[in-house]
Image: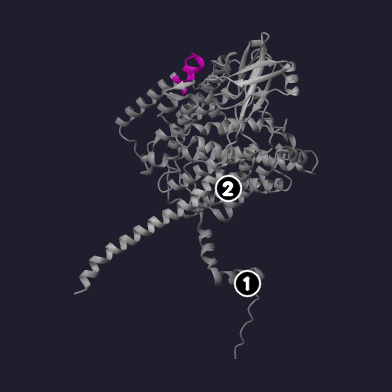
Amino acid sequence: MTAPLARTAKPARRSLLNWLLGVGVIGWAASVLYPVLRYLRPLSEAGAGGPLKLSAEELATLGKSHFVIARSGTRKVIVFEAAGELRALDAKCTHEGCTVQFVPGDSLLWCACHNGKFDLDGRVLSGPPPRPLVKWIASREGNDVVLTMEKA
Amino acid sequence: MIEAQPEAPASFGERLYRWLDARFGVGKLVEFARHKEVPVGGHSMVWYYLGGTTLFFFTVQLVSGVLLLMYYQPGEATSYESIRYVTAKVPFGWLIRSIHCWSAHLMILSLVVHMFSTMILKAYRKPRELTWLTGFLLFAIALGFGFSGYLLPWNELSFFATAVGTDSVKSVPVIGQWLLEVMRGGPDVTINTLYRFFALHIVILPLLIVGILSGHLIFIQVQGMAHGMAHQRPDRPGLRFFPDFLLRDLLLWLMCLIVLAVLVYLLPYGPGIPGMEWELGKKANPLAPAYPGIKPEWYFLWVYQLLKEFPPHLLGMEGPQAALLVVTVLMGIWALVPWLDRRASRGQPSPMFTDLAIAAIIFMSYLTLKAWDIGGHGVPGKLPDPRSTAWACAWITLGLASVIAVLRLLAYRQRWMYFSGAALLQVVLNGILGMDYLIAGGIALVVAIGGLVVSRREPAPQMGVPR
């Protein structure tokens, strides 16, 4: 009698085949998707946060408009002069990443996007920013201004 | 002998029709079209035209977009310059760009009104849940179009709008940072971001929208347009779609085109309202600070304002993360309305969801007005004062809400107003009494939930009772 045997054996074979097919489809989808996902993520840029010397042009802007924004690798730094003292902070607002500006009249840093305000040391005074701005050390070396990130 | 009468020779059109019918069975489609009707009665016919006007403006977007593509060159040294060239040098270039911008805003406006009318009239109820869901997706894609197209001129305004808009995705749990870098093509907004947005704007989103729009339209053809709820009279003959409704549609589209042309001619750079202007301005400079008065497009203003209202930290989350969680939850509720509104799906009146739509209008109006700094410009040259802004905006919202409430009471006999009342309570507590926005929101939420619990105990209103 082969008929009952075939009837019991068939579903097992079919479910095994279905399982193999499923695994195959998932494996295939993953092998297509993985390279695409890796391709989409850009390579990270090197050289962030090293000491930075302001160019002559940036120094001129600093003298003219009381502050200048410079780039160090992937970071943006705002350099400003308050009460004769040269200071530097991360220029990227910790709220939603807009670029802040120095308001000499009120002695504070202000982000125009959502009205975040920071004091001259980068601490949050008011508004929605969740964290202070990272401090940099701005020092004059001769006629140059050199910026280094403050160790946390 | 009877001679066969020579038949009149068939016209070219007739022969073409027979040729097609023999091969594709076009006759069935024609038969379907002949019986297609638009329901009459129950509520104003106006609401049946808004999907069509949205589609009309979308078509204008396709045509004007392709025309802009003939000159636009994405790139650090070319994006801004090519748009400037189009508007300043190319004959009628200003016209094409202005049409593209105006029509984008009008399309979203038409879409938003379409969505709210569908919500208030409960046209999403069974069996049209998927029509609502695809409509919601189309709405999301339309916002994606607006957001990605905004960056392409590579000017100052677009640069910071994109910086803020993309920065918010970092709040997504687990994959936030990955998503941020994939969207931007790096950790910051650079020209790589523009390349990605360009691909999104002209290839990925159009493909998506064509697919989903087809679904949306097929569902409407298969199921027909929804009848009004309260005065459903299936026996009453509807308005024939071909040609009666279609001709009205065409007339309306012609009127839309005229309005578009007048607006484009009179105000080629937009009405000058923040969030509705497209003067090219200065070229994007990643090293310039964000300038005062920077705002996103008007339909994102309520989210922008919400980001301002949230404190730096809330319940162990950073402010923006909490704000976006709130937006996500609200959007999720909105998308799932056909499944949440079980009364409407049984064909019973569900005043609660009418009121939910009104509450949404109050909630978003207040935030949008605040984002425009209305009433905050007391001292010239000074930053707008948030306190006096809130005061003025609260009174405007209160006026608007009162008009809506009176209209609902008198014209429609609607009584269920717990949600809209709660939304208005938040406006009053925050704007007029000066309470913190979130605390006021918390109180309003408690009131809304209280109203929900109380009304659950009441028996469900029966059909025929005014909503």
Cα gap from disc 1 to disc 2, whole angstroms: 41 Å
Q: Residue B84, percent across and down?
A: 76, 38
> How dense is the environment of label 2, judged by Cα within 10 Å: few (below 14), some, or many (20 and up)?
few
* Screen quadrant of the C terminus of chain B: top left
Chain letter of the residue carrying label 1: B
Choose between B425 and B290: the one closer to the eye. Answer: B290
From what the image shows, is residue B18 above or below residue B77? Answer: below
Q: Residue B182, percent across and down?
A: 55, 40
Residue wearing tag 2: B204
User: Which stretch appears magenta?
Assistant: B423-438
From what the image shows, is residue B61 above or below residue B456? Answer: below
1 and 2 marks on the same chain: yes
Choose between B173 and B157: the one closer to the eye. Answer: B173
Labelled pair 1, 2 in contact (Cβ < 8 Å) = no
Answer with mark 1 or mark 2, whichever residue precedes in sequence: 1
Q: Residue A128, percent across and down?
A: 52, 21
Residue wearing tag 1: B15
Choose between B225 and B286: the one closer to the eye. Answer: B286
* Residue A132 figure quarter: top right
Q: How is the image coloured?
A: one colour
